[in-house]
Amino acid sequence: MLKRQTYQLNPQDVGQPRGIGINVLFNNGDSVFNQTYTTKDQVKSNLINYILTNKGERMFDPTFGGDLRASLFNPDSTLDTITVRLENEIYAYVPNIIIRNISLKKYSDENLVNITLDYSINNQNDNLVINVSTTDLTQ
């Protein structure tokens, strides 16, 4: 039976950064996977991942994802129902945050929806702004 490896931190190593997760924004030329070193950064990365993932895309968890592309441009969906659904599902997948406000604004002329999410984690306020457009549907 394999034993789980345990780590003993030396007090001198406490101040040194240790990666806790992977950032979903792959914009660093140094490496493919950029690590996050704070809980705040990892939660933001988890939120971006959840919101931009379509249901059925994640293996072994077909209910994971904000499913925005399917619901935002569906004529039967309203922004209010999408907002309520997102808030409930975010709490299920990212339970350690407090959502203060979610707002969705639809810009019909540009075929764009702006999502603003104000939240707090460990008494630190943060916000996230994501733009989803119909041009993203073809990529």
Image: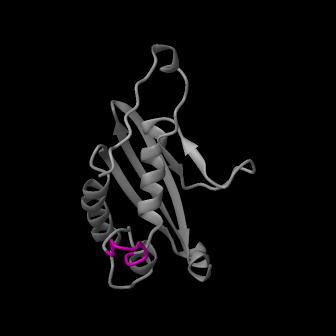
Classify residue 47 by image quadrant: bottom left
> According to the image, what is the colour scheme of the structure?
one colour
* Residue in view at x 52 percent, y 75 percent: 108
Q: Is residue 105 visible?
A: no
| Range drawn in magenta | 55-62
Q: Position of residue 74 (x, y in %)?
A: 40, 83
Q: Is residue 101 visible?
A: yes
Q: For this rendering, which residue is in front, 122 or 31?
A: 31
Q: Nearer the viewer, residue 30 or 25?
A: 30
Q: Residue furthest right?
A: 29
Q: Position of residue 118 (x, y in %)?
A: 39, 45
Closer to us: 125 or 96? 96
Task: Depth check: give the residue in front, 75 or 52.
Answer: 52
In the displayed orientation, state which residue is furthest to the front.
Answer: 1
The residue lying furthest to the bottom in this view is 75
Q: For the C terminus, which image quadrant?
A: bottom right
Report the number of discs.
Answer: 0
**Residue 58 is drawn in which quadrant?**
bottom left
* Residue 68, position as x, y percentages in the image: 42, 72
Q: Looking at the picture, does residue 111 appear above or below residue 98? A: below
Asked if residue 129 is positioned above or below residue 71 in the image, the reply reads above
Left or right of 98? Residue 56 is: right
The secondary structure that dominates the magenta segment is loop
93 left or right of 13? left
> Which residue sits furthest top?
12
What residue appears at the point 34 percent right and 73 percent down from the top-left corner? 60
Q: Is residue 137 magenta?
A: no
Q: Position of residue 31 (x, y in %)?
A: 70, 51
